[in-house]
Image (cartoon, rainbow, N blue to C red):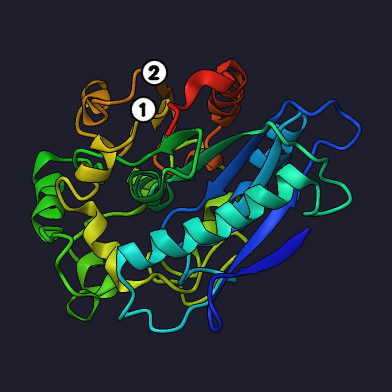
Amino acid sequence: MDFTVPVDEKRWIAMTAFAPGDRLPSGRVIFLAPGGGYARGYYDMAFLGHHGYSQAEHHTSRGHVVIAYDHLGVGGSCIDDLAGLTIEDIADANSKAVLAVMEQIRRGTLADFVPALPDALFIGAGQSMGGGVSILMQGRHACFDAIAVLGYSAIHTVLPQRTTAEVQQGIDTYQYDRQTKGADLSVVESAAGVVDFRYPFHWEDVPSDILAADMAGGYPLRRTAPPFGSLTIPNCVVAMMSPGFVAEEAKATHVPVFLGFGERDTSLNPHQEPAAFPHSQDITLSITPTMAHMHNFASTRHLLWNRLSAWAMGLTAGSRPQE
């Protein structure tokens, strides 16, 4: 079910709800946020002649409720003033919408097919930009009982390349901070500093037709967008690849954290990532083989999805510290 949630008189967040049907609900609700250049359809992909590309279906088959949503400035959400949006604007609007939906789920008023879950555990998950924004949402508003950060480094997000020199070129390109104004940032200009997007995004075994479906319309700023893509990326997102961009919010996170990376992904040293969350007492690190940055295209995607679902089931009502 597609729906929108108003965040003020002029802006809204677009969402899609997936429920487990006749399966006994697990009591877990997973909010999924997409990466830059992608939209919530990334979590429910379908390709002719291929099967098993819907993360949402995978999780609902295990009893979880899934809410996929577009960030403010992305996909079906309000896309006004892309240059003027700050990353705090995005995190705050997302949080307001998510909290409203949580209350509806507790009361059973979201939709007929979504059962009332008064004691639900709410998990905020996101890939790339979505992972970073989930950290911001948690640090600023403590809206989730746990977070899953997929393909985003709270230390320093760096796109892998074939050579050390090419990696360094990308690092040198993304030297901004939280004070950099959106009007001073350009998705197109910053992308010119990245030698290759295909190598970091897709493992070599991704089927050619699926690769074309993702990349043919251009990236990172798309000329045309597939059902899982977004034509818009707010300017402020460029700065998210700067060192320590979400460091303070990561330090302010007290809930369980799942850190999911592919074998070729955006962390220079994945095993150091838990140190960015010093106040979380429950941190899980998962590195999936033969997986590049865009996890849901990988042939090994189900390994990550299984791990994430199992981790969600292992959470308890006492995982979240009392306010």
In the rendered structure, find residue 199 and report the number of the disc placed on it: none
| Quadrant placement of the N terminus | bottom right
* Tag 1 and tag 2, C-beta contact below 8 Å: no
Q: Nearer the viewer, residue 136 or 100?
A: 100
Q: Residues within 10 Å of mark 2 (few under 14, many from 20)?
A: some
Is residue 189 rendered to the left or right of residue 21? Answer: left
Identified at 30% across, 80% down, the residue is: 84
Above or below 14: residue 284:
above
Rendered image quadrant of residue 236: bottom left
Question: In what element is the residue under mark 2?
Answer: loop
Above or below 46: residue 269:
above
Q: Name the residue under label 1.
A: 263
Identified at 58% across, 22% down, the residue is: 317
Is residue 168 rendered to the left or right of residue 302? Answer: left
Q: How crowded is mark 1: few (under 14 residues within 10 Å), some or many (20 or more)?
A: some
Q: Marks 1 and 2, Cα distance to the nearest angstrom?
A: 22 Å
Is residue 102 rendered to the left or right of residue 219? Answer: right
Q: Mark 2 points at which residue?
A: 282
